[in-house]
Amino acid sequence: MTIDPEIRCAKPEDIPIILAFMHATAAEQNVAHAVQATESELLNTLSFGDTYDGAQGSRNPVGKALLALDPEGKVAGMAIYFFTYAAWIAKPGVCLEDLFVLPQYRRQGYARLLVQAVAKQAKTSGCVRMEWLCYKENHRALNFYASLGANKLENLAFLRLDQEAMVDLTNGEP
């Protein structure tokens, strides 16, 4: 099926749908409790604008969001990403943080277009790699990513300190 969607940068008025998509994807992964973001926090931490770069203003945006619109202009999906740094080669990278397409739009090319848009931004920004995480049990997504040419890294472990652990590590200092 050929689609003619539009991929555009998120705008502040898109925050409610972005948050709803976050809740939906977390629920699909059986971690509905994991979403703690609020509309206010997203407004302050996502970059907005008509271009990929967006305007920073007095906010502290660290993430970027792209939306896929169907031919009628309805939001079909989103991709949230941020820039990283590959220290060993002293080059930027990009991390795809969240990818979600509404069920009725799946298997129509929307996810591929969103990932391609992030990859295009990464290439334009001089990034040497694009990375993301996926739950091991999400076989549908893993198969999709493999179809894009993504390699599963078996020799790396993903590690995380949550907020409480960071406080403990810093001896309770804020």
Image (tube, rainbow, N blue to C red):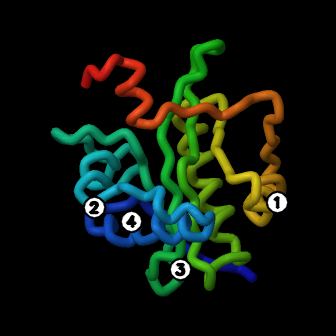
Q: Residue at x 61, y 31 (%)?
A: 159
Q: Nearer the viewer, mark 2 or mark 3?
A: 2
Q: x and y percent of residue 17 in the render? A: 38, 72
**Residue 167 picture quarter:** top left
Closer to the chain start, of discs 2 and 3, is 2
Residue that badge 2 annotates: 39
Between marks 1 and 3 in the image, the one whose residue lies nearer the viewer: 1
| Residue at left offset 57%, top offset 77% | 102
Q: Secondary structure at mark 2?
A: helix
* Label whose residue precedes the other's in the sequence (1 or 3): 3
Asked which secondary structure carries label 1, the reply is helix
Which label sits on residue 99?
Answer: none
Q: Are marks 1 and 4 in contact (CB under 8 Å)?
A: no
Secondary element type, mark 3:
loop
Instruction: Where is residue 70? Give x, y as percent.
Output: 53, 80
Q: What is the spatial separation of the Cα atoms under label 4 and label 3, in whole angstroms?
A: 19 Å
Q: What residue would you read off at disc 3?
A: 70
- Report the residue marked by disc 4: 19
Tag 4 near tag 2, CB within 8 Å: yes
**In this image, 133 relative to 36: left or right?**
right
Relative to 102, is 168 on the left or the right? left
Name the residue that disc number 1 marks. 143
Discs 2, 3 touching: Cβ within 8 Å: no
Answer with mark 1 or mark 2, whichever residue precedes in sequence: 2
- Is 9 positioned to the left or the right of 103 in the image? left
Label 3 sits on what residue type? Asp
Q: Is the residue marked by circle 4 packed among few (<14), some (14-19), or many (20+) residues within 10 Å?
A: some
